[in-house]
Image (cartoon, rainbow, N blue to C red):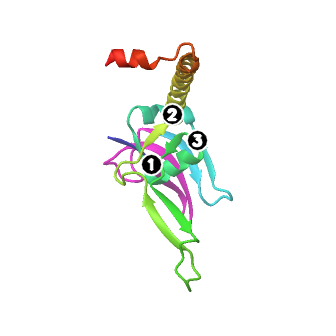
Amino acid sequence: MLRIRLRRVGKKGKPSYRIVVADVNAPRDGAYVEWIGNYDPMADPPAITIKKDRAIKWLSEGAQPSDAVRRILDREDILVRAPKFRTHTTADSEPEGASVPTVTITRTAAPAAVAVEPVAAVEAVAEETASEAIAEEVSEEAVAEETAEEVAAQEDPDEAPSDETVDEAR
C-alpha cells in the first residue's frame, strides 16, 4: 500500500520536508516512489510547493495521505476533508452563577473513516447534483401548475358535485 507522507531533510534544528509517495513499510527517510513537493515549516507563513496533478494521480490510485500531508493538501485545495467534530458554544443555557459558557462537542463523522476525495471528483459530483436539482424543480413546477388548475376547477360552483351525486355514489 502506498502512502503520501513527509520525508525530513535539512539541517539539525532547521527542518524541511519533501512530500513523497512511499511504501507504507519504508522508513521515514528511506526509499520513495516519487517526490511530489516540498514543505518548509520554518518560513513565515510555511512554504508549500506541490505538483497538484501528480498528487491527484496518486490519490486516485489509492495512495493514503498521512495526517500532516492531509492538512497540507486541504490547505492547497487538493483534498476536501470532512470535519470530525463540531463545537457548539451556548451562552443561553448557562446555569445561574456560571460565568463561563458551556461547550459541547458533537461527533459528525465516524472517527475511523474520514471522507477524503480529490477536489476534481467532488466538483464532478456537485455538477451532477446541480443538474438533477434543476430537473426536479422543472417537474415540481409542472405538477404545481396542474394541481392549481385542478383546484380552480373544483372551486367552480357549476362543476362542484351536488348532494344528490354524492348520495348516488354511496
Q: Find the residue positioned furthest to the right.
A: 44
Q: Secondary structure at mark 1?
A: strand
Q: CA distance from mark 1 to mark 3?
A: 17 Å
Amino acid identity at mark 2? Val
Q: CA distance from mark 2 to mark 1?
A: 23 Å
User: Which residues fall within the magenta stretch?
Assistant: 6-34
Mark yes or no: residue 12 visible. no
Residue receiving disc 3: 77
Q: Nearer the viewer, mark 3 or mark 2?
A: 2
- Badge 3: few (under 14), some or many (20 or more) residues near its Cα, within 10 Å? some
- Badge 2: few (under 14), some or many (20 or more) residues near its Cα, within 10 Å? few
Q: Disc 2 vs disc 1: Cβ atoms closer than 8 Å?
A: no
Residue depicted at x 51% and y 62%: 87
The numbered mark, 1 or 3, whose residue comes first in the sequence reads 1
Q: Is residue 105 above or below residue 158?
A: below
The numbered mark, 3 or 2, whose residue comes first in the sequence reads 3
Residue receiving disc 1: 5
- Badge 1: few (under 14), some or many (20 or more) residues near its Cα, within 10 Å? many
Residue receiving disc 2: 122
Left or right: 47 in relation to 72: right
Displayed quadrant of residue 3: top left
Amino acid identity at mark 3? Asp
Residue 29 image position (x, y, % from top left): 42, 53
Residue 9 image position (x, y, % from top left): 52, 55
Q: Secondary structure at mark 2?
A: helix
- Residue 28 part of the magenta-drawn span: yes
Q: Find the residue positioned furthest to the bottom.
A: 97
